[in-house]
Image (cartoon, rainbow, N blue to C red):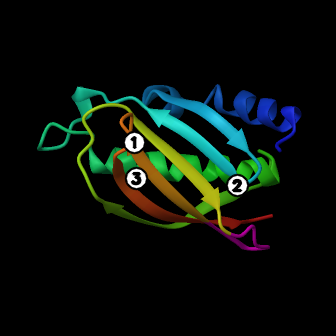
Amino acid sequence: MLAEERKEEILRAIRGIACIKSLGLEVLALDEGRATISGRHDPNFDGVNHTFHGGLLATLADCVAWFAIATQTGVGAPLVTTDLNIHYHNPCVGTAIATGTVLKLGRTLCPVQVEIRDTQEQLIATSRVCYMRLG
């Protein structure tokens, strides 16, 4: 179980991040090594097929991976994305819900498994995101 102080620390840290606000990301759940966030679909950023753009879904995966790691390291730990691989399974026309689970909190690398689903729980995408710890 994640300490309430850690949850508050993460929520305070993201309030001022422009990309979180611009993309309409909302934290739904935080637990030790796991995070769930939602991203609202904005038709202004649709892809060719008038669905949630794949690049924005990749951004959602990247963000939820950071949240999941931050539940274990705190927000002060310097982290950078080293790589992100995403597989798209179905189009998303509404809100996307991403859950990230830390696979290993390494001294250097922190791989995270991400699942993105729609509000009907249909699988939209799966992703593997890896962060590097700099400090």
Q: Say which residue appears at 23% left-offset and 46% top-offset.
A: 91
Instruction: Specify the label residue 76 is tagged with.
Output: none
Q: Is residue 1 left or right of residue 45?
A: right
Q: Say which residue appears at 37% left-offset and 32% top-offset.
A: 95
Instruction: Specify the label residue 58 is tagged with.
Output: 3
The mark nearer the N terminus, 3 or 1, is 3
The mark nearer the N terminus, 2 or 3, is 3
The residue type indicated by label 1 comes to Glu
**Are dots 3 and 1 in contact, CB under 8 Å?**
no
Q: Which residues are magenta?
A: 104-111
Image quadrant containing the C terminus? bottom right
Residue indicated by mark 1: 121
* Main secondary structure along the magenta-highlighted residues: loop
- Whether residue 108 is in magenta: the answer is yes
Image quadrant containing the N terminus? top right
Q: Secondary structure at mark 2?
A: helix
Quarter occupied by residue 118? top left
For disc 1, the neighbor class at 10 Å (few under 14, some 14 to 19, many from 20) is few
For disc 3, the neighbor class at 10 Å (few under 14, some 14 to 19, many from 20) is many
The residue type indicated by label 2 comes to Ile
Percent coordinates x, y for residue 134 in the rendering: 74, 65
Percent coordinates x, y for residue 39 in the rendering: 43, 34
Q: 133 or 38, which lies in front?
A: 38
Q: Secondary structure at mark 3?
A: helix
